[in-house]
Image (spheres, rainbow, N blue to C red):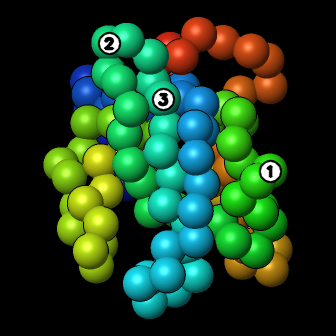
Amino acid sequence: MEQITWDDFSRVELRVGRVLSAEVFKEARKPAYVLQVDFGDEIGTRKSSAQITDLYRPEDLVGRLVVAVVNFPKKQIGPLMSECLVTGFHDAEGRVALCVPDADVPLGAKLA
């Protein structure tokens, strides 16, 4: 495993946001949702493509807190310009489970 410095890690902006909407990303090559995520006043709302269709339905995502990287460059994914990377972990079957805080925290809070 490659080691990084504390400075490397501290440059990654992992922030908490709340999913405002989740829709099927019909044009995606692999099943995905388009998420609109609110990161609070400082960062605002960002779009993301998330391949989390195995464990989540769109209606179950709205209102949930998620953790995302907000300082990657924007990435074109088909017709969508993704503005953040929602994080998760692969389970034993390869499905993505969201990385989420286990308590209510302010929108935009940075991972400590």
- Answer yes or no: is residue 3 visible: no
Where residue 36 appears, as percent x and y from the top left, is 48, 44
Badge 2 or badge 1: first in the primary sequence: 2
Residue 64 seen in the figure: yes
Towards the viewer: 100 or 27? 27
Residue 71 at what x, y percent from top left? 26, 36
- Label 3 vs label 1: CA separation? 16 Å
Q: Which amino acid does label 3 sit on?
A: Asp
Residue carrying label 1: 60
* Residue that label 3 marks: 38
Q: For mark 2, what is the residue?
A: 42
Q: Earlier in the sequence, mark 3 or mark 1?
A: 3
* Quarter in which the N terminus is drawn: bottom left
Q: What residue type is labelled 2?
A: Glu
Which residue is pictured at 41% across the width and 84% down the height?
A: 27
Question: CA–CA distance between discs 2 and 1?
Answer: 26 Å
Callout 3 secondary element: strand
Which corner quadrant of the image does residue 105 belong to?
A: top right
Q: Is residue 37 above or below residue 109?
A: below
**As shown in the figure, which amino acid type bears the numbered disc 1?**
Asp
Mark 2 is surrounded, within 10 Å at the Cα level, by few (under 14), some (14 to 19) or many (20 or more) other residues, namely few
Tag 1 secondary structure: helix
